[in-house]
Amino acid sequence: MDTVTISSIVTLSVAAAPILGTAALFLVGLIIWWRTGSSITILSRLWRLLHGKMSPAVPAISGYLAAQAEVARLSFETGARFRTAQQAERVIAWSIRHDESLCDAAACGPYFDFELPGLKDRSSQPKPWAIVGIGAFFAILSIAILTAALFMIPDRAILRLTATGTWLTIDRESVKPMTFAPGFTLARCSRDHSAIPPRAGFTTAEVGALCDAVKAESPASLGRFIDRSIAGQRQVLGVIAVTLACWAWPTYATLRHAGKANAMRERLRRKAATGADRATAASSQEERIGD
């Protein structure tokens, strides 16, 4: 007799492979668009899929499409978004003349002018104190979010006593204040709760209110309430985490772009100073030879 397994008695309602394949293609397309800022590569592949690999009959069109394909490739590999082949040629000439990388130019973000081409004036960048302030604020906010996560991730509901404003955590076995106090087990509420010592972290009135509420609930009802509270606070944590990520990425990008622009500006300054020193030295040597 054949062994009965779960896979032999059920049928998957959705095939996983096509979904994963479609998701992978979408992710690749998203990465290409993010790197190049253009959808020409994606649309070109789509056109070939629908019409086959056909070369344009008009030389001007075929030349333009080939140039744009090369521009998209250069943008993808360097992260520098170029509009046209002519613009790319100007920026490449600038990078060779100043001994700089296109990747470094792209890393400067909005502080590098690809139309010029060259670095924008320093006044376009955030002030140093603003950069430090933004970084410090982000660090403090991140620490606060991580601290909140430490409380929200465990299987304990975070609640607040309405009458006194005391914050506490509770599960099916114990209740604790949000301090370093040990709290007390819910089983003690079935006995004389007046014996619960103050070192548990609650006042006598708070202990009485908590125990009265626990005894009024059945274990199943209390468990459902705790589970709903935990689910709600984890949803809030998810919203906070997404909000933090949406805020953190542009903040990090701004700080990184400003740092890369400052580093490039310093390199260009040193190169200019070195070139001037070499020119002065060469001029002095020529004067000595002339004498």
Image: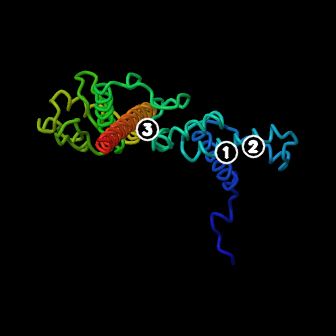
Type of colouring:
rainbow
Residue at screen point 65% across, 74% down: 3
Q: Position of residue 31 (x, y in %)?
A: 59, 44
Q: CA distance from mark 1 to mark 2?
A: 13 Å
Residue at the image position 29 percent from the left and 30 percent from the top? 132
Q: Residue at x 32, y 29 (%)?
A: 131
> Mark number for residue 231?
3
Q: Pinpoint residue 235: horizontal percent, then vertical percent.
A: 45, 35
Q: Earlier in the sequence, mark 1 or mark 2?
A: 2
Q: Residues within 10 Å of mark 2 (few under 14, many from 20)?
A: few
Q: How many marks?
A: 3
Q: CA distance from mark 3 to mark 1?
A: 51 Å
Cα distance in 3D space between marks 3 and 2: 46 Å
Q: Amino acid at mark 2?
A: Ser
Which of the two discs, 3 and 1, sits closer to the camera? 1
Question: Which residue is identified by label 1?
Answer: 70
For the question of whether residue 194 can be seen, the reply is: yes
Label 1 close to label 2 by CB (< 8 Å): no
Mark identifier at residue 44? 2
> Tag 2, which secondary structure?
helix
Assess disc 3: are there few (<14), some (14-19) or many (≥20) residues with their C-alpha within 10 Å of its C-alpha: some
Q: Quadrant of residue 16?
A: bottom right
Contact, mark 3 vs mark 2 (Cβ under 8 Å):
no
Report the front residue among 274 and 279: 279
Quadrant housing the C terminus:
top left
Q: Nearer the viewer, residue 272 or 61?
A: 272
Answer with left or right where residue 166 lies relative to residue 150: left
> SS of the residue at dot 1?
helix
Task: Name the residue type under label 1.
Answer: Glu
